[in-house]
Image (cartoon, helix red, strand yellow):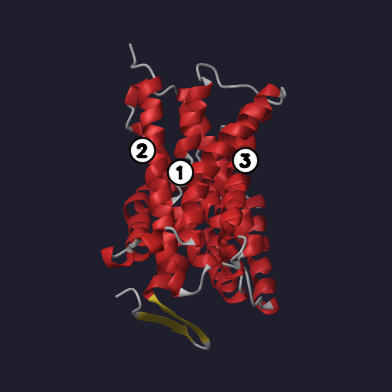
């Protein structure tokens, strides 16, 4: 079913892809649009707006991206064909990580939720940069020029005070098509559109926050399940001990479970000890460690980067096994650590 060809043609313009790629290139562009909206809101007037608030999660995110990549490289260093997957364990799935944290209810301090949210958003920003720099190929100069024109149009609309989301959607669709044809991954168009949406209008409203609230249920209950259904399936016949301990799944699983907790906790600890930032009020090191474990839930973002890293379908099963294994271990361990250390609300 996911290989069903779907074609859209307008005159000489033709977009013909299997259903799977429409999900990965089209629906995921909407997911990244939401990510772009969240990043802009947090940077402008959220938890990343002031350096004293952003320092710890940003530093922790750097560790949470670099150490998992090094772990993957260490496992796959003798296999050049699989080194392209180094960024797969560098990602954190915001929705699933926050979902596990929410299971602990009122015992979770607000500051700890904010830390995890800011960490995951900074991590997403890093993933966007990685995709733009390392997972592009066969660039089309004409399409890139047209994409640049569309981005300039979005910026001009923002500066001119255009607040109608429909206008941004029209130009954004043109941008998406140009980016799709350029060789740069089309989902990055979603980020650009999200960053262009105005945060405030003259009447005191917020087009950005309104669009964010509108998209959240569609992304959470539609796009993410559709992506997971299309990309995360592993039949029991594919799961053998040899498959589990192959370099790709082993590197991903260890990167998510070990690399994330070492990177996030280690960089955060070093930053505080060096006086670069401080722990949030009411949050202890054991709580930071629990969040570092939850950061190893890669799922949606890791699976997505896996589709970019390996065009060979033969690697798909290994990517799924590694992402699911590392994410499940991280979720269980993080939940147990936080449940054991967070006191119930009085």
Q: Which mark is residue 332?
A: 2
Tag 1: Cα neighbours inside 10 Å, few (<14), some, or many (≥20)? many
Distance, label 1 to label 2, CA atoms, is 16 Å
> In which quadrant of the rendered image does the C terminus lie?
top left
Q: Earlier in the sequence, mark 3 or mark 2?
A: 3
Residue at left 53%, top 66%? 308
Q: Are marks 1 and 2 in contact (CB under 8 Å)?
A: no
Q: Is residue 172 toward the left or the right of residue 113 in the image?
A: right
**Residue matched to label 3:** 63
Q: Residue furthest left?
A: 236
* Position of 327 relative to 320 (above/below): above
In the structure shown, which secondary structural element does the residue marked by tag 3 occupy? Answer: helix
On the image, the x and y values in percent for residue 230 come to 35, 65
Distance, label 3 to label 2, CA atoms, is 21 Å
Q: Is residue 189 toward the left or the right of residue 52 in the image?
A: left
Q: Which mark is residue 71?
A: none
Q: Residue furthest bottom?
A: 12
Residue closer to the observer: 111 or 342: 342
In the structure shown, which secondary structural element does the residue marked by tag 2 occupy? Answer: helix
Residue at left 53%, top 59%? 190
In the structure shown, which secondary structural element does the residue marked by tag 1 occupy? Answer: helix
Q: Earlier in the sequence, mark 1 or mark 2?
A: 1
Residue at left 37%, top 74%? 19
On the image, the x and y values in percent for residue 162 come to 58, 53
> In which quadrant of the rendered image does the N terminus lie?
bottom left
Residue closer to the observer: 160 or 226: 226
Tag 3: Cα neighbours inside 10 Å, few (<14), some, or many (≥20)? many
Q: Earlier in the sequence, mark 1 or mark 3?
A: 3
Q: Which mark is residue 94?
A: 1
């Amino acid at each position: 079913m996911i290989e069903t060809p779907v074609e859209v043609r307008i005159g000489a313009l033709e977009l013909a892809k299997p259903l799977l790629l429409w999900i990965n290139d089209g629906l995921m562009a909407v997911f990244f649009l939401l990510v772009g909206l969240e990043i802009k809101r947090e940077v402008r007037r959220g938890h990343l707006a002031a350096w004293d608030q952003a320092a710890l999660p940003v530093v922790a995110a750097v560790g949470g991206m670099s150490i998992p990549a090094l772990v993957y490289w260490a496992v796959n260093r003798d296999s050049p064909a699989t080194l392209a997957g180094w960024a797969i364990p560098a990602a954190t799935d915001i929705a699933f990580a926050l979902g596990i944290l929410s299971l602990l209810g009122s015992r979770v301090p607000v500051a700890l939720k904010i830390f995890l949210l800011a960490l995951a958003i900074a991590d997403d920003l890093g993933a966007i940069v990685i995709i733009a720099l390392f997972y592009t190929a066969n660039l089309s100069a004409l399409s890139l020029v047209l994409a640049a024109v569309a981005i300039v149009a979005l910026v001009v609309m923002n500066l001119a005070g255009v607040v109608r989301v429909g206008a941004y959607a029209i130009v954004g669709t043109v941008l998406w098509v140009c980016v799709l044809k350029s060789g740069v991954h089309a989902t990055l168009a979603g980020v650009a559109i999200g960053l262009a949406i105005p945060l405030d209008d003259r009447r005191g409203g917020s087009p950005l926050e309104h669009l964010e609230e509108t998209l959240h249920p569609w992304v959470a209950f539609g796009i993410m399940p559709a992506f997971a259904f299309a990309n995360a399936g592993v039949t029991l016949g594919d799961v053998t001990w040899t498959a589990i301990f192959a370099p790709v799944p082993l590197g991903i699983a260890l990167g998510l479970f070990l690399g994330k907790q070492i990177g996030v906790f280690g960089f955060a600890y070093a930053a505080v000890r060096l006086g670069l930032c401080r722990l949030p009020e009411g949050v202890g090191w054991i709580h930071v460690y629990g969040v570092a474990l939850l950061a190893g839930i890669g799922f949606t973002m890791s699976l997505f980067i896996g589709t970019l890293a390996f065009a060979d379908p033969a690697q798909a099963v290994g990517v799924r096994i590694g992402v699911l294994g590392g994410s499940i271990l991280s979720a269980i361990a993080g939940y147990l650590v936080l449940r054991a250390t967070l006191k119930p609300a009085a």
